[in-house]
Amino acid sequence: MTSTPIVVHQPSPTGGRRVTVYGHGHDEILGTAYSDHDLVVFLAASGVQDPDSMLDDDLWIEWRGGPPHQWSAA
């Protein structure tokens, strides 16, 4: 388990990043995000209040395998 409840995983070779949230003792896949907007929609749908404000908050979101806000493979 990570210390942050939300993980944006490394960009896939075809683009997009899987998004997972930790809760109820396990990771749950929210979907594949292709933009900040997609990420905000996933977080809002999972009950996160004001998801726009937390995209750069490393206490809540861990960006793995690439810089924040990069949605395509390098």
Image (cartoon, grey):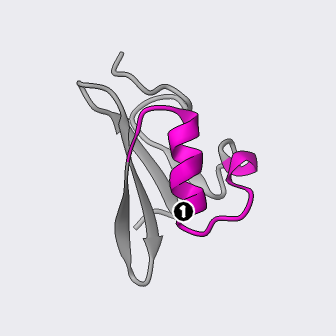
The answer to whether residue 58 is seen in the rendering is yes
Percent x, y of residue 66: 44, 30
Q: Quadrant of residue 9?
A: top left
Q: Which residues are magenta?
A: 32-54
Q: Secondary structure at mark 1?
A: helix
Residue 19 sits inside the magenta stretch: no
Percent x, y of residue 54: 70, 50
Horizontal relation, residue 52 to residue 17: left or right? right
Residue in the picture at 46% in, 53% down: 7
Q: Residues within 10 Å of mark 1 (few under 14, many from 20)?
A: few
Horizontal relation, residue 66 to residue 62: left or right? left
- The quadrant of the rendering that contains the C terminus is top left
User: In the displayed image of the protein, which residue is found farthest to the top?
Assistant: 74
The answer to whether residue 57 is seen in the rendering is no
In the image, is residue 68 above or below residue 58? above
Residue designated by label 1: 45
Residue in the picture at 68% in, 53% down: 51
- The residue lying toward the viewer, choosing from 16 and 2, is 16
Amino acid type, mark 1: Ala
- The residue lying toward the viewer, choosing from 54 and 35, is 35
Residue in the picture at 32% in, 26% down: 15
User: In the displayed image of the protein, which residue is found farthest to the left?
Assistant: 13
Horizontal relation, residue 52 to residue 29: left or right? right
Tell how many labels.
1
- The quadrant of the rendering that contains the N terminus is bottom left
Percent x, y of residue 22: 45, 70
User: In the displayed image of the protein, which residue is found farthest to the bottom?
Assistant: 24
Magenta stretch: helix, strand or loop mostly: helix
Q: Quadrant of residue 13?
A: top left
Horizontal relation, residue 45 to residue 60: left or right? left
